[in-house]
Amino acid sequence: ASNSLLEGLVFGARVARAMPQAAQAGVLVGPLREAEPPASPGAAGPPSERLRTETDVRRLMWDAAGLLRDRAPLVRAVSLLAACEATVAGQPADLRSPDERRLASLVTVGHLIARAALRRTESRGGQFRADFPARDDVHWADHIVERSRN
């Protein structure tokens, strides 16, 4: 785990420096395809099920999109995060507290991750889908662009 943390620090900084240059030059690495939204996950769950704190979001993401993934928890996570994101989207950012802005950012990132994890019907690297245990290079050996709807 310590090596991956150090790699994240080093390569994260390198990527951040390289992104403006690549964007200006119009450089793309590998084939890209626009992400298609996954099938509608349905209702957001019982009304009492809300994401109110960073801990709620972290727990949901660990349970649904952690090391072991499966469709049902991912569908639930996408639904809950979408409902929370929609609620936050209606609030002006300048009227939110720093904690509310941080929670809104975590929800947005969590929603993007959960949607991408639900869409990817394979296991690859450290991301294991119990319902799709095999790697699938035929359908998934490319890059996917995922955008927030807000």
Image: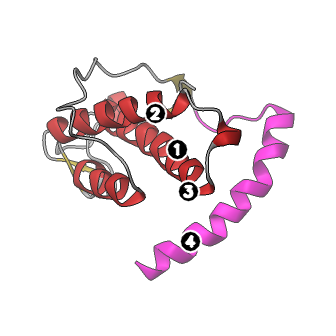
Q: Nearer the viewer, mark 3 or mark 2?
A: 3
Instruction: Kindly check if marks 1 and 2 are in contact, taking CB atoms under 8 A apart as contact.
Output: yes
The residue to which callout 4 is attached is 7
User: Which mark, residue 99?
Assistant: 3
Q: Residue at x 37, y 37 (%)?
A: 81
Separation (CA) of disc 2 from disc 4:
30 Å
Who comes first in sequence, dot 2 or dot 4? 4
Query: Which quadrant is the N terminus positioned in?
Result: bottom left
Instruction: Kindly check if marks 1 and 3 are in contact, taking CB atoms under 8 A apart as contact.
Output: no
Who comes first in sequence, dot 1 or dot 3? 3
Q: Quadrant of residue 112?
A: top left
Q: Nearer the viewer, mark 1 or mark 3?
A: 3
Q: Nearer the viewer, mark 2 or mark 4?
A: 2
Q: Residue at x 26, y 46 (%)?
A: 123
Q: Is residue 145 visible?
A: no
Amino acid found under the numbered disc labelled 3: Asp
